[in-house]
Image (tube, rainbow, N blue to C red):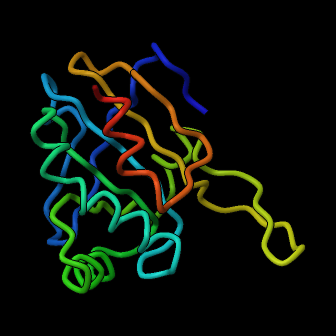
Amino acid sequence: MLKKGQNAPDFSLPDDTGSTVRLSDFRGKKVVVYFYPKDDTPGCTREACSFRDTYDTLLDKGAVVIGISADSPESHAEFKKKYSLPFYLLSDHDKKVVREYGAWGKKKLYGKEYEGILRSTFIVNEEGLIHKVFPDVRPDEHGPEVLTALA
C-alpha cells in the first residue's frame, strides 16, 4: 500500500457517465480517493452515504471526492442515483489502479479467504503527494474521520 509522502499514481478512468476523469485534472486541490468493493452493498453504501453527508464540508475544505471500484459505469450511475451521491465514482474494471495503490489483497468472509478490493482511502495533497492513508476503513465513521484529517 502507498505511504504518506509518496507520489499518488495518476489514473484515467471512466465515471458513471462514461466521461474520463484523471487524478491530474485536480492538481492544486486536495483529493480524497477511496477504494471500495462493490456498489449498493451494505458496507459500501454506508461509506458512500458517510461521504455524501459530509460532502459540503469536504468541499469547504477544498477537497474533491473520488470513489473507485471495479463496478461498471452503469452500476455507478444507478448507485449514485439511488443514494443521491454528489461525487465522482470511477470504474477500474481491470483493477489496475486498485493494485497501483495497494488496495487489493486477501480478505476473509464467513471464514473463507479470497482476494478483493480492500476498503481504503488516500488523501492526495495539492502537489499530488499522498498526505494521509486510511488502510482499514470503518464505513460508518469514515466521512467525519476524513474531515478531521483535512483540518
Task: Work out which quarter of the rendered image holds the N terminus and state it.
Answer: top right
Which residue sits at x=56%, y=55%?
Answer: 138
Which residue sits at x=36%, y=44%?
Answer: 33
Task: Give the x, y percent position of residue 110.
Answer: 83, 78
Which residue sits at x=85%, y=67%?
Answer: 113
- Where, by quadrant of the figure, is residue 90 drawn? bottom left
Task: Give the x, y percent position of residue 89.
Answer: 28, 62
Question: Relative to 27, does residue 119 appear above or below in the rendering?
Answer: below
Question: Relative to 111, does residue 151 appear above or below in the rendering?
Answer: above
Task: Work out which quarter of the rendered image holds the C terminus and state it.
Answer: top left
Task: Give the x, y percent position of residue 67.
Answer: 34, 56
Point out the residue furthest to the right here: 111
- Where, by quadrant of the figure, is residue 82 drawn? bottom left
Task: Give the x, y percent position of residue 87.
Answer: 19, 59
Q: Nearer the viewer, residue 92 or 52?
A: 52
Question: Relative to 68, does residue 81 appear above or below in the rendering?
Answer: below
Image position of 22 (left or right of 143): left
- Where, by quadrant of the figure, is residue 2 drawn? top right
Which residue sits at x=44%, y=63%?
Answer: 69
Image position of 79 (left or right of 71): left
Q: How many marks?
A: 0
